[in-house]
Amino acid sequence: MAAFKEMLLETLNDLSCQEFEKFKEVLELTVFQEDLIDISVRFSDTAEIVYLMLQNYGQQSVELMMKTFKKMNRSDLVQRLDTSSGNKGPSRSSESEAHGDIMDSSDWTKLEPEVNSTDADEAPTYSLQSEAGTFECSVSDLRWVCKEKVSFKYQFCSWEEHMERMEILQYMPAGPLMDITVTAGKLNEVYLPHWICTDDNPEILDKFAVLHIDSCGDVVEKVSEVTSSHVKLSEPIFSPRAVLMKLGFPVKIKCNVLIYYQTNTTFLKLHVYLIPHDPALEKTVDKKKSSKGYEIIEKPRPDKYLKMQQGFVLKSDISTAKISPQILTLRYDSQDPNFYEVFIENPDTNFNLTLSHSCTNKSKPVCEPVWTCELRKVDYLKSGHFEEEHTVDELSALVHKTATITTVKEKLFRVLQRLREEDFEHFKWFLENKIAKSKLEKANRTRVVDLMEQTYNQQAVEVTKMLFKKMDRNDLVKLL
């Protein structure tokens, strides 16, 4: 820290009085944009600014000052700080040099895995095979490089039984835990996905590690290369594997928002989860909610990285909505993650949900939303219906619509009954483009019809015809 202090002081002392005033102005703006603690440097001298920065931002002070100088068009000072501080820790560039900017997702050939699931209580197995080249799994984001034909499979594992040991080792999960098994050929390089944001704080790169669980216990390995989304393993040995992050450092992560609603109620009750982008945890939550009569409402996830241990507030633009708790803290909880409950007595209109930081900074009374979505009545067809008066014409139209839907459902059910079990599983596989796999895995024919009606509405018959054509079942197409 003494070396950082001396370096920052020397750099600031090279500024003219006018440049120094400009620096303070731009620094305050940068601090605001990075959502950091406001240190109010407007009336401070160089020594006090450096002291305040190191006290509040630590080694991140160098990166923060570089960003400030960049906005001032002082590339010479940016270069000086970059050279003086040194680029320690894992490399971010060697992967790019080896494969020609392979960090770009367009350079990887995406493959859809084959999903095998025999038991609802067990995690499904994903199988993949490829020729030589660079590939990415479309489900897990796992990447691999091979020089020959290769086949392998993997399962997502729960972090639950490992969390206590990780905390003792002073690490936290930074990506999904996957058990990988190579069945043929060899994987020369593997890139494990992580959900940590590295752009805001390059110093965080040397806080990454990789977990390797074998028969002897937990092994925490150092990392040689980190990209914005992956950690590289060269000549890997396989077992349950995952990316770790050292505890005690503020990080932002990639998140999912899961929305569930309780079916068969006159009111609307939502349970809204904010969790890390962990497929195993999502499956655990989905299984728990499904067993209690909840169905998921699929919406896009936040496009921004969100800060761990930060409080978030969920709000609705419908005045009758009751939401609790008022603030929910983003943390990784593999056992029983907390959620917002949204209760609306009579949901008679479309409405929006908005997620924002809980503002503790007095200079920022209004926090910008980090995620928003519109919930439409069609999103929760099995809930939220209430009594209302209808005219004779409206009642007639409603009865006709109900009869039509019933007829469509009956047709779909009867034609699905003509499929053998193997063909029925094939049919469900085609539906996974629009309907969540977790809903389809153990769904029987009546459940599949309900899911199709909810997803496609009056287009369900046409979608079914299209899928039958893909399956070369033109006899069923004619029947429909």
Image (spheres, rainbow, N blue to C red):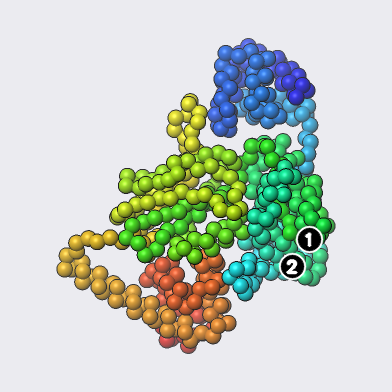
Give the secondary structure at mark 1.
loop
**Viewer can see residue 264:** yes
Does 428 sit left or right of 116 as displayed? left
Residue pictured at 50% horizontal, 80% vertical: 468
Q: CA distance from mark 1 to mark 2?
A: 11 Å
Q: Quadrant of residue 87?
A: top right
Q: Label 2, on which residue? A: 152
Residue pictured at 39% horizontal, 61% vertical: 380
Q: Nearer the viewer, residue 446 or 107?
A: 446
Q: Nearer the viewer, residue 396 or 336?
A: 336
Q: Nearer the viewer, residue 470 or 342?
A: 342
Residue pictured at 53% horizontal, 42% vertical: 329
Task: Indicate the amino acid at tag 1.
Answer: Phe
Q: Label 1, on which residue? A: 238
Mark 1 surroundings within 10 Å by alpha-carbon count, few (fewer than 14), some (14 through 19), many (20 or more) = some
- Residue projecting furthest to the left: 392
Q: Quadrant of residue 366?
A: top left
Q: Position of residue 6 (x, y in %)?
A: 76, 19
Check whether the beta carbons of the residues at disc 1 and disc 2 lie within 8 A of each other.
Answer: yes
Residue pictured at 65% horizontal, 58% vertical: 158
**Viewer can see residue 470:** no
Q: Position of residue 374 (x, y in %)?
A: 41, 52
Quadrant of the image containing the C terminus: bottom left
Sequence-wise, which precedes: disc 1 or disc 2? 2
